[in-house]
Image (tube, rainbow, N blue to C red):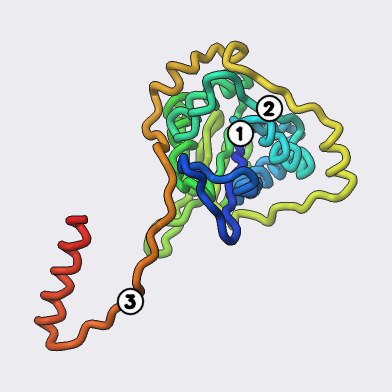
């Protein structure tokens, strides 16, 4: 069984950071790492692959720095890695445009199962995997907390509100978005890290995937127009008085904030 695992290299703003005059982060800030949710989806894929003598293919959309995250996946048990990049894809960062790029890879690879992290640690849209399933017209289950292979089917669980657990049986080809805590991601050995450095990372451009960057970007649902630091507030203010007076003052504060 071939399993495709889309992964993301996420930005991590540790400590202080500064913005340039154009609103962009200064060079060297932020640091980059493999998305936490993708660590769990990768481990789930590797476990399923080991039990069924399958293949795990990881894919990420991004510039050359993304290969560090892909090699981390290779060190943790992935068999192959694909990086998608090329002229015109720099703006493909929202869930819809990313999903359209990943859909092209999925059509080329024809996996039996696609495992996505439920969300990314930086943008936290929790939408790319769901959008990908829609573009591929695949059955999908979101926020999965357990996976078991049952012959040709998969039995999966997901937590609902109020502590209820929903159990579903789904047949591949399908797509699952995976929640943290589903397993314990393995830590790569030094030998695995060295071997991952020697493995090739395939690079696919828009032409190889029959993608038109202009069409991909035109289908974006949102675009980042700028970054700014959140203004520092004066801190909490204690309101005193009768309940009716405090409620009236809260109403005034809310209206003043909305009018800014």
Q: Mark 3–mark 2 contact, CB under 8 Å? A: no
| Quarter of the rendering containing residue 260 | bottom left
Residue topped by disc 1: 152
Q: How far apart are marks 1 and 2 (CA)?
A: 27 Å
The local crowd at label 1, few if under 14, some if 14 to 19, many if 20 or more residues have their Cα within 10 Å, is few
Determine whether label 1 and label 2 are within 8 Å by CB: no
The numbered disc on residue 82 is 2
Q: Disc 3 to disc 1, how far (Cα)?
A: 57 Å
Location of residue 193 in the rendering, given as x and y in whole percent from the top left corner? 84, 44
For marks 1 and 2 on the same chain, the one whose residue lies earlier in the sequence: 2
At x 62%, y 12%, the residue is 208
Mark 2 element type: strand
Q: Nearer the viewer, mark 1 or mark 2?
A: 2
| In the image: residue 190, left or right of residue 91 | right
Say whether marks 3 and 1 touch (CB < 8 Å). no
Marks 3, 1: nearer the viewer? 3
Check the picture and name the quadrant holding the N terminus.
top right
Q: Mark 3 points at which residue?
A: 236
Disc 3/disc 2 C-alpha distance (Å): 49 Å
Question: Which of pointers 3 and 2 indicates the residue nearer the eye?
Answer: 3
Q: Residue furthest front?
A: 21
Q: Residues within 10 Å of mark 2 (few under 14, many from 20)?
A: some
Residue at position x 57%, y 60% in the image? 16
Measured as percent of width and height from the top left, residue 112 is found at 60, 28
Q: For residue 184, which quarter of the picture? A: bottom right
Q: Is mark 1 on a helix, strand or loop?
A: loop
Drawn side of residue 216 relative to residue 184, left or right: left
Q: Considering only order in the chain, which callout, 2 or 3, is on the residue closer to the N terminus?
A: 2
In depth, the one of 244 and 228 nearer the eye is 228
Label 3: how many residues lie within 10 Å, few (<14), some (14-19) or many (20+)? Answer: few
The foreground one among 41 and 206 is 206
Q: Is residue 144 visible?
A: no
């Amino acid at each position: 069984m071939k399993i495709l695992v889309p992964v993301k290299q996420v930005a991590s703003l540790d400590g202080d950071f500064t913005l340039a005059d154009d609103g962009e982060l200064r060079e060297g800030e932020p640091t980059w790492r493999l998305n936490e949710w993708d660590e769990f989806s990768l481990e789930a894929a590797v476990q399923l692959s080991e039990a069924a003598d399958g293949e795990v293919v990881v894919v990420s959309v991004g510039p050359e720095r993304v290969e560090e995250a892909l090699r981390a996946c290779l060190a943790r048990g992935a068999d192959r890695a694909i990086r998608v990049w090329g002229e015109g894809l720099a703006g493909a960062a929202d869930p819809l445009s990313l999903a359209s790029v990943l859909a092209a890879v999925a059509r080329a690879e024809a996996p039996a199962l696609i495992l996505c992290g439920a969300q990314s640690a930086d943008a936290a849209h929790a939408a790319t995997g769901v959008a990908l399933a829609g573009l591929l017209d695949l059955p999908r289950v979101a926020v999965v907390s357990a996976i078991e292979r049952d012959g040709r089917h998969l039995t999966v669980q997901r937590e609902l509100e109020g502590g209820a657990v929903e159990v579903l049986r789904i047949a591949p080809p399908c797509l699952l978005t995976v929640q943290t805590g589903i397993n314990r991601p393995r830590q790569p050995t030094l030998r695995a890290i060295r071997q991952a450095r020697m493995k090739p990372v395939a690079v696919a451009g828009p032409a190889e995937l029959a993608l038109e960057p202009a069409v991909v970007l035109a289908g974006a649902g949102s675009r980042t127009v700028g970054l700014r630091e959140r203004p520092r507030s004066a801190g909490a203010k204690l309101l005193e008085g009768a309940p009716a007076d405090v409620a009236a003052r809260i109403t005034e504060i809310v209206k003043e904030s909305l009018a800014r």
